[in-house]
Image (tube, coloured by chain):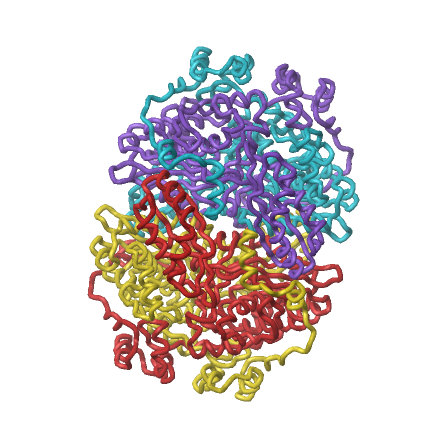
Chain colours: A cyan, B purple, C yellow, D red
């Protein structure tokens, strides 16, 4: 993360001018004075406990009420399963984009996308992309693969021990499966992979998880396998961990990008030249040029995959539908491709290998999140594959809209409108 | 993203068994039947328009009301600046972790962290980490650098033209600055960098943006520079784009990771052995072992940086305080380091080069988000540097808690408790 | 690849000062004057043809003879299978390091390493590392996996076609194998993997290749499979390529790093404290510190894996033994780990997933290269696995030597000695 | 590096069948029997010492003589500065490709490329590419930037100390420069950059190094700066290292790829449609298709940059001209771009940010290497910039040849000819 020292100097002058080194040191030193009171803990179940918390936080009533409104308090027990130290609810505006026509293996029809965001122009941008796709007859979408993994790590005394363990593990794959699957009704252990690094061994246990995103489920199943290994392996590990940071959980990784994490989905469309002109105000040639320059921009800045702004749509849809929004860190990778085709039209495709969605579990059961799933029409357990395909279709809509705007040089114009507080509904990139 | 064909076969059997190739083809083809109605568009300002939207969506009243509650409708105009096609608000539970003592250049004192999430155990985990840090006298935190960039791309006829442009640009850096700064009160153009790839030239304009996250501001300023270039460069670009996917916007990139995007912050602590034992139920030696194995796990899975779960805390705090939660995709990278020190204690540090936060703009002004900023005590424009330092301190709390749990083998136990719907308040990893 | 414009300006002043833009443009323009004569082509078999080539090159006799010496001319036919437009031979000095004791699955005993290099200190550095390993009783080494792949790419009209192709391919894996293996005596197709990106499909055909490095073999086998696909697939590709840059050939890639390319090998040792002190003049604690800081240095500079200087040893050994030295680009990745252990000793391990070596084919049969294989004692076809293990053991020797020198602050001292033309035999880092 | 356990099993059966776990363990254990004799050490200066070495190696005379030929022995003192434990010289065949017309800022004219390799078809492939470029009027080439860095690391007690050090360093940049430049006649310290990670600080000192590649020079200069820091910094580092694996030395890194290491060069050409057809037997459209699919192949396999086979040409030219061939590990990264242009022609460009070449130092002074520099016509100290531009031009020739062959489906055909021992002069991909 190298910063030129000259540049650092201007930063210092901006922020620290007039402070002596001793003053700065004093600010940075540990302090052992008594701390402010702890938040009265545990899972919130009583109005009294909630009141105690707000006593500690000591905010004006009006501020407090914007979080601790009567409706939220009335539903306290519903929220209690999803949070600790509850003090109320955040209100995030929801807009709807669509309809978005999707011709998928699982998703079939015209979908309205509920998007929760505080970023102006985002809904308008996805709405514009959805309109283009729908007018083209919809996009094709396909779930390509699925799997969630945990990756325990085992440290042995020596490479010889590590080798003996791997030989033994090869002969006990079926045991691993039956033990893992004994902990869960919906999870299946589909493959076990191994990485040896000196006397360290990482396993990668890959599962399918039914309708749930499944992070919890695979952790429990993996711990059972680890316990079996600790009890039975002829070479005993000196220590081991149920997750050795090898599974790509909550972070972008090339390993997950090159395989699958959660669900791998792709979507494509062929747009006629006339539609590109009418709705995106540009040409397929110009969009191909943008794609080429921006793909190399991604390569030269060291991104994982090459894409525009998958994160925008995924964050808004994950949030609205009760998914784990932290998973945007791992999901927002993939490949966007645009090509002009012979008749002046545009071929466009997106591929997202790490979509983490479920229709049960997490926040999916909360009232407003459940309502958003119903806006989508995907609130049943068996809808998880369709929801993943919707993510790809939505990402394609978003890429067409933003690349269209950048190609038509409308991107900055939309930002200027935003800055003046005006509507961006027509050009609408995010 | 290679999948073994054998593995693919089991996927197909699971999902597509019994369907013929022709049936599948039929599902995937474009469809030109009339689409469902479009959402009545634009920025929502009237109850009538809102009503029309719900007519289209056609949900039962109870479901509708969980989004379109009276309070949200009453505040419609407040939300209107942040969203299009508004239909109501999502309710996300907020829990509080802390206090977290921070001894920073900017952040000074004991902070309560408002975290909006639907993931059980998350608040408890950060709360546990905050407690350890606070009992150790607080963590040291430091804002190291700041800057947000836009990266326009220019395509010339030839390398000779590209070279002439670069020579000219070198002589017009001051012009670039005055033009860029003419579009904004708060933004400053601090550096212009250049990348030549054949006849393509990418500029990287780096700005400071005051109290705002500033993505909007830098786009407008950059477009002004692009326009100046198109008008004045002796070599005229054949085409150009205001952003050529080189700035790391909404995605993890090594370039942003090795420099800065938004704010670069670091935090550290030294934990006495006794505190590690008492609060984390493990030893510094065991945590160092975990760090080493997990750092290599990150390296071997191809992550950008090495860290545990920054995304969890950042997503919850960004959401609560009205930041752009899609930026978790770029922010959730960095370096965590843990070392046992001579007296059996633990040194731990986190470094996050891409924290994107502001205390004005985005969703910061919305009522419940503003209340969360006040829970933090950071609702004033000048508080943005402190907010960034809080992000680092919170990330450090989260790393200590999860690595502690994995080292003490409490991680899976907490997940099992979750699965049984029990409290996880004491062990509490996320 | 961003360069600050200010920095670019000093580059320009250094190199281009005093030249006008027009002068520069003139230098850069295509020129259609007659070209210098072409080198008389083809595979060199006659002294006359060689003479013609030297006529064109027109060098003084003394210079010419340093390449076209009598011995090289006498062996012209031997070289002819390995090169075109032959004009003589380059003489590269060879030094020997060792003995290096290796306790491997395949390599067993004390090996002398022939290293061809023009970089002073390199042989001395590896010799020092070999000595440490040998005095510790040798290092353990293990071949972990093997496989070389080709990755043809297929472009279909649509995702539906791509999907149909994949379904068909799943049912014809056995055909792929028999067709591939019909082209080669030594190659076996061990797995076929698939990646779908929109309407593009990449296959990855992984082979074992017997004693040869096998790049040639797998290309021919893959082309046969491609031809079978073009003839038989129900969905016909619009175009296809036998290699779509997905196999990691001649370049470092995370995909190859996370799996295997060529041979994956690992080596480890436990060094007593006394040996670290006596031979490396430092302590295990100091080497662990260096490892930690340098591992994060690798992470923060965006390397693939973390290691010190595998390239130095691999280039010298590949060259000496007639391997394809361009493969250093893909082979010089992996993971080095160092840990102090309880008794003050040091655990050290290296893991190299992409070692590309063979004992037949390439330059292995050339006289001086064959002699180097005999110095190693690995000149038989069945010795390829042992040769790969030697690469790991040598890499471990090199890491111990350089990290020892950096830890003992002898690295710069050795460079200073070099600069004064003195021997570096005792400290000897490279 | 995960391997499916099933796959691992077949590996084990192939290699270890019939061996018991105890037998395997026995092979892997340290052995403390007396080792074979050490190679009589030091820099070889006498025939006696050389004789002793060969006594130890104990090879048949005929084998020995292929390394220790009379000519090599006669030049022993010349080689002695470049190697330790000298036993003779390796003979690597040299072929010539060209002429290659280059219209560069520095390189001007028609160049013959001496290529040392044992890989058949390599010279023919580059020769074919050179012919195409030359017939197009030559390629344009440009040196864009230069710089070699060392990156010392400093560990402080705390972040506060690290911060104080950075503040002090900002005020002593001029001292760093004068101290660094006091150790060298040709090196200049052009910039100092800083990275803070907790209580660790990495500096990155960037130098220009005149005509030499300069790795040695920058190490000595950096050590002098480190010593100054250790003596004068108000915050004293607990430990420090002259290189903390942050400079990209001998390994591909995104940091070096996004900036410069050694010399950054680019080259471009516009090929008329007719020339593409006549010499490459394909069309610009087909080559653009290949480029697009292979660029995404690179992205999806996680390479640094996207390119075809830079390593092949660089390894052969580095070797022939006495460069450090291990640097292929860092040099073989960059960006290749191909675009069909309006008239059916092809635009092609390569950009290599990490070319490490010099015309003095290393092996450049050895007789056959010096002769190769004269074949090129670049043997004078001031020729280093031109040599770097030649590397880019050569890489462009290589990309056109191989992508042409893959597009024309001649790649596998050439490999088949190779396998039958026939000439590949006409199609000639490598």
The image quarter in which residue D97 lies: bottom right
Residue that protrudes farthest toward the top in the picture: A48
Tell which of A156 and D217 is nearer to you.
D217
At horizontal 28% and vertical 72% (from top left) the residue drawn is D42
The image quarter in which residue A398 lies: top right
Horizontal relation, residue C28 to residue D161: left or right: right
Tell me where residue D174 appears, x and y as whole percent.
42, 52
Whether residue C154 is visible, yes or no, is: no
Check the image and report above or below for A100 versus C303.
above
Tell me where residue A322 appears, x and y as whole percent.
55, 27
Whether residue B245 is visible, yes or no, is: yes
Residue that protrudes farthest toward the front in the picture: A18
Horizontal relation, residue A279 to residue C383: left or right: right
Horizontal relation, residue B248 to residue A56: left or right: right
Check the image and report above or below for D222 versus D158.
below
Tell which of B182 and C331 is nearer to you.
B182
Tell me where residue A43 appears, x and y as whole percent.
43, 19
Horizontal relation, residue A424 to residue A386: left or right: right
């Amino acid at each position: 993360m190298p910063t030129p020292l000259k540049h650092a100097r201007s930063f210092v002058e901006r922020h620290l001018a007039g402070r002596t080194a001793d003053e700065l040191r004093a600010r940075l030193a540990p302090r052992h004075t008594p701390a402010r009171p702890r938040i009265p803990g545990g899972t919130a179940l009583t109005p009294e406990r909630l009141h105690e918390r707000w006593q500690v936080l000591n905010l004006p009533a009006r501020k407090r009420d914007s979080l601790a409104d009567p409706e939220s308090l009335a539903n306290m027990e519903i929220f209690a399963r999803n949070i600790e130290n509850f003090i109320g609810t955040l209100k995030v505006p929801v807009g709807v984009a669509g309809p978005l026509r999707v011709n998928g293996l699982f998703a079939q029809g015209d979908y309205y996308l509920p998007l929760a965001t505080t970023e102006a122009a985002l809904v308008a941008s996805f709405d514009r992309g959805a309109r283009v796709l729908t007018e083209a007859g919809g996009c094709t979408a396909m779930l390509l693969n699925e799997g969630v993994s945990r990756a325990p790590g085992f440290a042995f005394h020596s490479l010889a021990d590590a080798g003996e363990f791997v030989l033994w593990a090869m002969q006990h794959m079926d045991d691993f499966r039956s033990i893992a699957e004994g902990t869960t009704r919906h999870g299946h252990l589909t493959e076990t992979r191994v990485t040896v690094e000196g006397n360290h061994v990482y396993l990668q246990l890959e599962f399918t998880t039914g309708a749930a995103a499944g992070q919890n489920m695979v952790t429990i199943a993996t711990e059972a396998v680890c316990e079996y290994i600790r009890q039975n392996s002829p070479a005993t590990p000196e220590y081991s961990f149920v997750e050795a940071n090898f599974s790509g959980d909550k972070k972008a990784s090339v390993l997950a990008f090159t395989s699958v994490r959660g669900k791998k989905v792709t979507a494509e469309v062929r747009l006629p030249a006339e539609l590109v002109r009418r709705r995106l105000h540009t040409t397929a040639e110009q969009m191909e040029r943008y794609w080429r320059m921006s793909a190399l921009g991604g390569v030269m800045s060291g991104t994982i995959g090459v894409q525009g702004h998958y994160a925008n749509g995924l964050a808004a849809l994950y949030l609205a539908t009760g998914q784990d929004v932290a998973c945007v860190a791992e999901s927002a990778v993939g490949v966007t491709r645009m090509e002009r085709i012979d008749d002046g039209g545009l071929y466009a495709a997106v591929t997202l290998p790490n979509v983490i969605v479920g229709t049960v579990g997490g926040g999916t059961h909360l009232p407003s999140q459940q309502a958003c799933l119903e806006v989508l029409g995907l609130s049943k357990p068996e809808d998880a594959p369709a929801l993943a395909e919707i993510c790809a279709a939505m990402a394609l809509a978003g890429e067409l809209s933003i690349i269209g705007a950048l190609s038509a040089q409308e991107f900055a114009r939309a930002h200027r409108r935003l800055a003046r507080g005006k509507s961006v509904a027509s050009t609408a990139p995010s």
